[in-house]
Image (cartoon, helix red, strand yellow):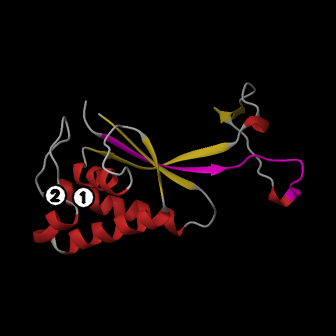
């Protein structure tokens, strides 16, 4: 048990008759190298990728609650704008660059199974992992929407 946090990227891939061939997606689902016959590619509308997973990163979770979820911490799934992810990257970098002031950028918060509230190596590693993952996904071309979800 504990605070688990997920950031997903959801991309619309539905093909329509009016689309030109170069606009259409080719979707194949395989298991052990074999095409899975009980999944119809024509019925697939979205591809969802897990962009980031955190465990007990309560400071980052608190940022999502305050900046994306409008203060409501309910384990729901919330749309996240690209600009919000860019803001999170900047805050993580500020906290990493100013460790004595990290509490001002991304404060740790206590909670039921939320983990440590210390500003220790685990806290800063989570911030660095966040920067690395988000910089990579934000640099990718293409469309897609981001969603944050947490559970505990």
In the rendered image, the residue lying farthest to the top is 38
- Alpha-carbon span between mark 2 and mark 1: 6 Å
Q: Secondary structure at mark 1?
A: helix
- Report the disc number at residue 121: 2
Q: Residue at x 22, y 61 (%)?
A: 106
Residue 73: image location, x then y, percent:
31, 42
Residue 90: image location, x then y, percent:
33, 71
Q: Which residues are magenta?
A: 4-21
Q: Residue at x 40, y 45 (%)?
A: 6
Q: Is residue 12 magenta-colored?
A: yes
Left or right of 16 on screen, residue 2: left
Q: Secondary structure at mark 2?
A: helix
Give the answer, above or below, for where 97 lies relative to 121: below
Residue 104: image location, x then y, percent:
16, 67
Q: Residue at x 56, y 54 (%)?
A: 145
- Report the disc number at residue 125: 1
CB contact under 8 Å: marks 2 and 1: yes
**Nearer to us in this view, 44 or 27:** 44
**Nearer to us in this view, 136 or 105:** 105
**Nearer to us in this view, 51 or 114:** 114
Specify the quadrant of the image occupied by residue 98.
Answer: bottom left
């Amino acid at each position: 048990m504990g605070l688990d946090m997920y950031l997903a990227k959801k991309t619309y891939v539905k093909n329509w008759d009016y689309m030109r061939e170069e606009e259409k997606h080719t979707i194949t689902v395989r298991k052990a190298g074999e095409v899975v016959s009980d999944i119809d590619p024509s019925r697939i509308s979205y591809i969802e990728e897990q962009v980031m997973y955190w465990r007990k990163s309560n400071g980052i979770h608190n940022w999502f609650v305050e900046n994306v979820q409008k203060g409501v911490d309910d384990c729901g799934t919330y749309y996240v704008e690209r600009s919000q992810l860019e803001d999170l990257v900047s805050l993580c970098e500020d906290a990493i660059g100013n460790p004595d002031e990290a509490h001002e950028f991304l404060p740790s918060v206590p909670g039921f199974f939320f983990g440590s509230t210390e500003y220790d190596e685990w806290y800063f590693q989570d911030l660095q992992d966040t920067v690395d993952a988000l910089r990579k996904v934000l640099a990718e071309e293409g469309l897609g929407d981001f969603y944050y979800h947490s559970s505990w």
